[in-house]
Image (cartoon, rainbow, N blue to C red):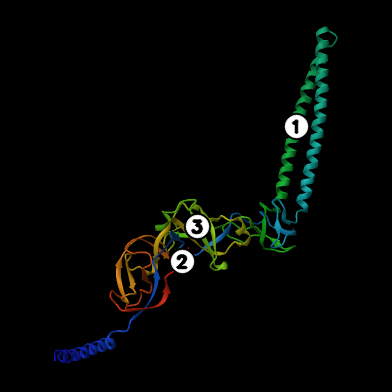
Amino acid sequence: MIKRRLIRWALPVLLVAAAVFFIWQYTRPDPVEIVVKSVDRGTVEKIVANTRAGTVKACRRAKLSPSIGGQIAKLPVREGDSVRAGQLLLELWNDDLIAQSTLAESEAVTAKSRAKAACLEAEVAQREANRQVKLRKTGAASEEQADRAVTRAKALKANYEASKAMVHTSRARVGVARANLARTRLTAPFDGVIAEITGELYEYVTPSPIGVATPPAVDIIDASCFYVTAPIDEVDAAAITKGMPARVNLDAFGEQYFTGRVRRIAAYVLDREKQARTVDVEVEFTRSEDLSRLLAGYSADVEIILDVRADALRIPTQAILDGKRVYVYLPDQEIIGERRIEPGLSNWDFTEVVSGLQPGELVVINVDRAEIRDGAHAVVTGGNGDSTAGD
């Protein structure tokens, strides 16, 4: 009897419970699709990056032009040629200056010979004067003879001094002629590669007028040394010091990074209209084997490493909201829970977690969806438990 009563009461209860379950099942919102990453350990770096594209530059680059105008008579190099320091790159027609230089050198030789002859004459005259003075003392020569000999010796000595002065003048004239001749020639100031030549054989070139820039006749680049100059926001530049490690990414090489270090920080801030104030920072490449692959003018981005934390508890930076909030996925309940954390070092990829999370917990990274909130029913559709990218 009692058993029948229990069955009679239990059946309606079960039917009501089943009805409630089915109503709840069909009326509750669909689960939010989320992408998760597990909390893991790895390296986290604090970095600063350039605000606009940087540029690869050669440590030495010379844009050369003759200091005088003239017709190109010799052009022994071509674009792309490797040259040595002192090698002739270009020479203007200079036959007249060569003749003047030759004449000046001949005059210098003549002046030197005349000075030598004057020296010998002066020495002979001085010996004769000494002899006449001795004879005058013994009475064997008159006072007039002795005086005449002494005067002649002095005159020839003065002529010798004038001849020596002419030798110095002739040498200076040779220097002037050679300097004028050198102005018609361009030579390589260092070992390098010819980047560009403006002009052809027998064309006429003119020097740049004051205030008017003209293309250089020869552009030479030292291909053995390159660096990157990049603008860094003034707010970030204060934390940078010389010698800090850096990474360089070149558009020409895709995702490949080159190692480098800070070699110079500009001593002033650039204030350009309608642009943020920046400080130019130079980063040199630290691997010599990378230099052969570089070209001056490549666009580049730099990441300067301010601090590094190894084996840090970390999560993807994109998972953090308002600097201190994250959503974690609770798989046993299939819901999302909000958690507050204390962040440490951070970059674009990862942020160090000082407290608030444990290794292995799953954080939601597609937090831009409006449906994601504390307590929301969720289903994982992407991501995994291994967030090792960026090590």
Residue under pointer 3:
246
* Picture layout, residue 58 above or below residue 315: above
Residue 215 visible? The answer is no
**Disc 1 versus disc 2: nearer the observer:** 2
Question: Which label is found at residue 388?
Answer: 2
Counting residues from the N terminus, which is met first, the one under dot 2 or under dot 3? 3
Which image quadrant is residue 344 in? Answer: bottom left
375 relative position to 315: left or right: left
As rendered, which of 71 and 232 lies closer to the eye?
232
Q: Position of residue 337 (x, y in %)?
A: 30, 72
Q: Position of residue 351 (x, y in %)?
A: 39, 63
For mark 2, give the secondary structure.
loop
Which image quadrant is residue 11 in? Answer: bottom left
Q: CA distance from mark 1 to mark 3?
A: 64 Å
Residues at badges 1 and 3 in contact (C-beta under 8 Å)? no
Q: Amino acid at mark 3?
A: Ala
User: Of all residues shown, which one is farthest toward the front?
Assistant: 1
Q: Amino acid at mark 2?
A: Thr
Q: How many marks?
A: 3
Residue 139 visible? The answer is yes
**Disc 1 versus disc 3: nearer the observer:** 3
Q: CA distance from mark 2 to mark 3?
A: 21 Å
* Picture layout, residue 288 above or below residue 139: below
Residue under pointer 1:
164
Counting residues from the N terminus, which is met first, the one under dot 1 or under dot 2? 1
234 relative position to 137: left or right: left
